[in-house]
Amino acid sequence: MLDRLAYGDWTREELVAMDDRFVVAVETSFRRGLESRAAARSTATVRQRLTVEQAIQAAWIWYCRNRDAADIPFAAVVARVRARCPGVKPECIRAGFERRFRRSTPLPQVLGGGGGGAGGSLA
């Protein structure tokens, strides 16, 4: 469980494997002349995506630590994510939380029209 909290939806091994595959693909593109290093340096989209995921992960950790003590409204989760990464759409945050709920053990009964439970206001 702590591994999942520390690395989001993936284990450290999965992240390292993804990184290795990405580096090989990018280096191959450089060698073949399909991509330039200057163009790659100027791309900020990947950094922004990581920032969104990091903000959602930080809110997830906060939620997990506090969900048993209080009923946490989704608006509070959105506010926490946006405090770290302004402008993130609620749909993106909800999707990130739904992925994490599906992967967490035991599966909380809060999304998809279930019957209440801890954090029931996220549904």
Image (tube, rainbow, N blue to C red):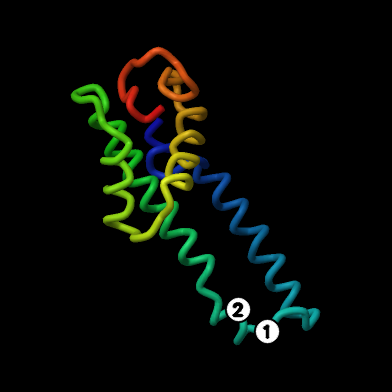
Mark drawn on residue 40: 2
Which residue corresponds to mark 1? 36
Q: Amino acid at mark 1?
A: Ser
Residue at 28% across / 33% down in the picture?
A: 73
62 in relation to 43, above or below = above
The residue drawn where x is 54% and y is 81% is 42
> In the image, residue 98 lies at what x, y percent?
48, 34
Residue 7 image point, x, y percent? 44, 45
Instruction: Decide if residue 9 is on the left or right side of residue 115.
Output: right
Furthest-left residue in this view? 69
Instruction: Report how far apart the C-alphas of labels 2 and 1 lie in the structure.
Output: 6 Å
Is the Cβ of the residue at disc 2 closer than 8 Å to that at disc 1? Answer: yes
Residue 30: image location, x then y, percent: 72, 79
Residue, x 44% and y 37% (percent of image)?
A: 97
Callout 2, which amino acid? Ala
Task: Give the residue displayed 41% in from the left and 22% down from the top.
Answer: 110
- Vertically, is 87 above or below 68? below
Of 13 and 114, which appears nearest the observer?
114
Q: Residue 78, percent across and down?
A: 33, 45
Q: Residues within 10 Å of mark 2 (few under 14, many from 20)?
A: few
Query: Height in image: 103 above or below 9?
Result: above
Instruction: Describe the element under mark 2 as helix, strand or loop.
Output: helix
Element type at marker 1?
Answer: loop
